Image (cartoon, grey):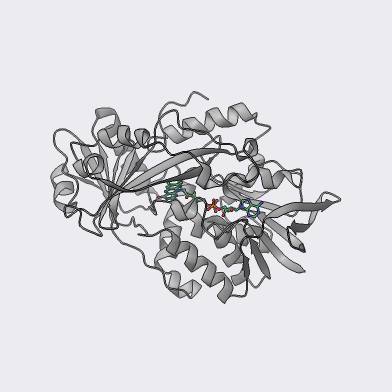
């Protein structure tokens, strides 16, 4: 069997890469060890966020929103996207200053963003009533996808519509390299020769790259969220709220409220140190972590900490040392590419990241600015540093301008 491009991993990043390669006229096979979207992507919160820490990520985030909203037009499959808008809320003077800087910076990069009073936030959002001091921003262009699996399914259907094969329950067990060039992919069932191989294996991305002797510098770190039982106080489609000083996000979900957040000292989980059968189902969940986070916003959004919990789910982010995506050719292994280093935004940035990597693979040149994301920007990084840096980036998801110890 032969393909122009083999993509390893049928999560959001792999499927988007495959779809854009197929749209560029390449023969494509996507291989997943489990079901498409069953690991990180299907468990995501589904939030898209225009406000990012640098111009490139802002551009990719906004392009992704555009691609998600127009999915039916360019991919040929329907996709429902909730045009909710979002508020960013800061309750400390330091975080308010941080948001003021974000307002100036993001507006300069074209984001539709404005300062909003706390009263306006309380009027526009059924489930959140901020009291006391604070500062808020309103971003009308932010969106969310109610059920993250719907994006995965739309990608998979669009891949098949455009001629790509999406193979599930077919683990990749080997990569053949001769003369420094990857030549073929070995699964449990077949050998596929390929001109390009894209490693989009999520938390297993380093493990897969190592099959070809390549290295991808990411540390998988646990992230969790909850959804409450349906609650009449939560109006479906209401805006997303991100409380930046508490590092907590909130949105309507399944008739109730979704809440998730970023603790300090999160749990790193390296699949390479786990049994071979390890999957996201084996990542231990800890309701206490979520309770501490939601308690911090109990005054503003009481349902988040008081309403009965209907869903508690979690999975792994792939954190990179500088908090930016890891996208491009894997150093030292010609023909091997990577789409990873999600840093908690891989679901929402997948439309643009897949588009960018596919253009790079099929056209031979990185789209403007994207070469900055190549894994070659890192020298050798020890496993310990990867974890330390990854945990720092995770804890500072909403305030990446905080003084960095590195
Ligand atoms: C609780 C939670 C909430 C989140 N919320 C958001 C959010 O609101 N917005 C956002 O942008 N991001 C969010 N994220 C992050 C987002 O889910 C990830 O960035 C994104 O899903 C990464 O996609 P992926 O394709 O790299 O990984 P995955 O979806 O994990 O896909 C990787 C795939 O590779 C497969 N694989 C691994 N090894 C092999 C092998 N040897 N052979 C074949 N296949 C293999 C796996 O089975 C898996 O299906 C959240 C994550 C979690 C856990």
Q: Is residue 134 above or below residue 149?
A: above
Q: Residue at x 65, y 59 (%)?
A: 7
In percent of width and height, residue 92 lies at 25, 29
Residue 129 visible in this rendered orientation of the protein: yes
User: Vertical placement of 396 versus 14: above or below?
Assistant: above
Q: In screen coordinates, is 389 left or right of 241? A: right
In the rendered image, the vertical position of residue 118 relative to residue 157, given as above or below = above
Q: Quadrant of the N terminus?
A: bottom right
Residue at image coords 34%, 40%: 102
Q: Nearer the viewer, residue 185 or 320?
A: 185
Q: How many marks?
A: 0
Task: Give percent across and percent down for residue 406.
Answer: 53, 25
Q: With 68 as the anchor, is 97 left or right in this view?
A: left
**Can you tell which quarter of the image residue 160 is in?**
bottom right
**x then y, percent, for residue 256:** 25, 53
Q: Is residue 75 left or right of residue 51?
A: right
């Amino acid at each position: 069997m032969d393909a122009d491009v083999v993509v390893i991993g049928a999560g959001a990043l792999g499927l988007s890469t495959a779809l854009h390669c197929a749209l560029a006229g390449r023969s494509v096979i996507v291989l997943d060890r489990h079901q498409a979207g069953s690991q990180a992507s299907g468990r995501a919160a589904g939030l898209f966020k225009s406000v990012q820490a640098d111009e490139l990520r802002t551009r990719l985030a906004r392009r992704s929103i555009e691609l998600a909203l127009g999915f039916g037009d360019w991919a040929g499959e329907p996709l429902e996207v909730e045009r909710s808008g979002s508020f960013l809320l800061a309750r400390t003077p330091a975080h308010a200053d941080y948001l003021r800087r974000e307002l100036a910076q993001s507006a300069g990069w074209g984001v539709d963003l404005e300062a909003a009073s706390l009263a306006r936030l309380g009027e526009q959002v059924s489930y959140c009533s901020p009291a006391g001091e604070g500062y808020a921003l309103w971003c009308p262009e932010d969106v969310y996808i109610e059920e993250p699996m719907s994006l995965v399914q739309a990608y998979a259907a669009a891949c098949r519509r455009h001629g790509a094969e999406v193979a599930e329950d077919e683990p990749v067990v080997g990569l053949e390299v001769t003369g420094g060039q990857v030549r073929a992919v070995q699964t449990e069932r077949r050998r596929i020769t390929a001109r390009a191989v894209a490693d989009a294996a999520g938390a297993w991305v380093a493990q897969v790259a190592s099959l070809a002797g390549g290295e991808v510098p990411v540390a998988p770190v646990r992230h969790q969220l909850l959804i409450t039982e349906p609650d009449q106080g939560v109006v479906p489609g209401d805006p997303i709220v991100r409380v930046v000083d508490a590092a907590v996000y909130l949105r309507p979900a399944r008739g109730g409220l979704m809440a998730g957040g970023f603790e300090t000292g999160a749990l790193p989980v390296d699949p390479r140190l786990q049994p071979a059968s390890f999957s996201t189902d084996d990542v231990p969940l800890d309701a206490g972590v979520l309770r501490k986070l939601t308690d911090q916003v109990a005054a503003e959004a009481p349902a988040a900490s008081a309403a009965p919990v209907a869903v508690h789910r979690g999975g792994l982010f792939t954190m990179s040392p500088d908090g930016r995506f890891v996208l491009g050719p894997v150093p030292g292994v010609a023909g091997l590419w990577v789409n990873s280093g999600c840093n908690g935004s891989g679901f929402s940035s997948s439309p643009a990241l897949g588009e960018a990597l596919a253009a790079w693979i099929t056209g031979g040149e990185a789209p403007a600015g994207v070469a900055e994301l190549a894994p070659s920007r890192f020298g050798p990084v020890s496993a310990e540093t990867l974890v330390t840096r990854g945990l720092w980036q995770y804890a500072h998801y909403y305030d990446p301008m905080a003084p960095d110890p590195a």
